[in-house]
Amino acid sequence: MRLRMKGGPYKLRRRAKELSLILIVLVGATVLLWTWDRSPVLTSSLPSKNKLLHLSPDIKTVPLEPKRHVKEEISTLTRSEVINNKEEHHFDETSSTDTTETVPIQKKEEEATKHKHGPKREKTGVIKTGSSSTQIEETKNVILLEKTSEKEEKTVENQACNHAKGKWVIDDRRPLYSGFGCKQWLAPMWACRLMQRQDFAFEKTRWQPKDCDMEEFEGSKFLARMRDKTLAFVGDSLGRQQFQSLMCMITAGKNSSDVLDVGKEYGLVIPPGGKRPNGWAYRFPSTNTTVIYYWSSTLCDLEPLNVKDPHTEYAMHLDRPPAFLHQFLPKIDVVVLNSGHHWNRGKLMANRWVMYVGGVPNNNSKIADMGSAKNFTIHSTVKWVDSQLPKYPLLKAFYRSISPRHFVNGDWNTGGSCDNTTPMSIGKEVLQEESSDYSAASAVRGTGVKLLDITALSQVRDEGHISQFSITATPGVQDCLHWCLPGVPDTWNEILFAQI
């Protein structure tokens, strides 16, 4: 009895210890399993098959990072460096409301921003059922879906790209055509390779927008994109330069005997007693693509007051678009408008232009000022084009901001010069968000007309003008308004191509 009583408590203590050990083992195993399931380090040691099966539902597609270029030491372009209205003879003082307005936000950019920051589509990352091969195939589909989404997001970023913000870089692949060639389209007075100029480093530059890539221009791609379509430049001599630049870019500067002159279809013929037509129109038969230039320096309707008098004055209808636009806009798919450098008293007097508003001579002193008249006309024409967009929903309309002049120590007729031949010596990068052409920016704001903003990026290229090398220049007179071709206007067309 005593032995049994002694052994009883001992056995109970022993069994208690065994139970305690079992409980400790069970708790430890439970904690280990729970930790294994939660820890990324431990789960990474799972077989590859399990890796495919355990895609986290929290994984989100990260947009592709845009290519970034190494930032160099640069002279950042400031607002005061772009256009000094007081120094520019072609500019009169503009109203304060124009100079304080900001760049318009384009409708497509707004939509792109909403899409970019809107709710992201949900992706199913966990495969629960089915055979191993089915699970792997479904997982591949998930990965492909994520990659597709990445491409979509990058496309949205490109659509919202601010092409006016960026920098000039050296590119040995430039120019896009030879300055010795392209005689079929390029006027000799703008082909600097045919002049006495010896420095051509300006031809080896390319514009690189900030935080986005710009599509490389190719003539074949342009013609394919513009198949059965018509592009028209309507504006002054800088618009004509852009037109000739584009023709050279499309053909790579080579003679193209198959291109048709279709000027007659648009009334572009030499008038009686005239030296040249008011424009040109050429068609590429392979894609039925037509490229037009129409001269309209002030972008308003000009009407002779007495058609029988060769010295008649012309009514300059500030509130009417050029008659060419009225007549041919239905046949145009892309239109690029510009104006600016002809808005001065000297031009009005030399051309016998008289300002009209509402069909009668203007008597509003606020409009009579040259700067105000220019702004009034630009706003009026852009507003009219915008009113036509609902009728022609496929029409793409652009207003090109002003091309800067670089006269130093005078104007074109007072000894002004632009002798620099070193590319980007005054700066190479543009970081400003707003356009430097405040009049153009305010004109397109709230409309379907897009701003082709080339002012600031052209301002840092003072070495690209014809300067003293003009074949028609008189001693002491330099051309610091027009550009050498190939040259800066080629970039305007690259940006245009990226937006159409």
Image (cartoon, rainbow, N blue to C red):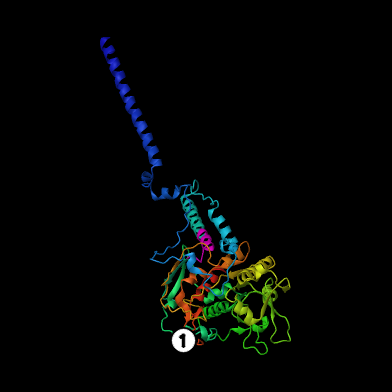
Is 70 located above or below residue 4 in the figure? below
Query: What is the crowding at mark 1: few (fewer than 14 residues within 10 Å), some, or many (at least 20)?
Result: some
Label 1 sits on residue: 195
Give whichever of 281, 300 is nearer the camera: 300
Give whichever of 385, 482 is nearer the camera: 482
Question: Magenta includes 160?
Answer: yes
Residue 495, percent across and down? 52, 70
State the residue at coordinates (39%, 50%). 48
The residue furthest top is 1
State the residue at coordinates (26%, 10%). 2
Residue type at tag 1:
Met
Give whichever of 288, 176 is nearer the camera: 176
State the residue at coordinates (67%, 87%). 271
Is 457 located above or below residue 285 in the figure? above
Image quadrant where residue 287 sits: bottom right
Tell me if I can see residue 290 in this picture: no
Q: Which residues are magenta?
A: 152-165
Horizontal side of residue 283 vs 163, given as left or right:
right
Tell me if I can see residue 239 in this picture: yes
Is 279 located above or below residue 154 in the figure? below
Tag 1's secondary structure? loop
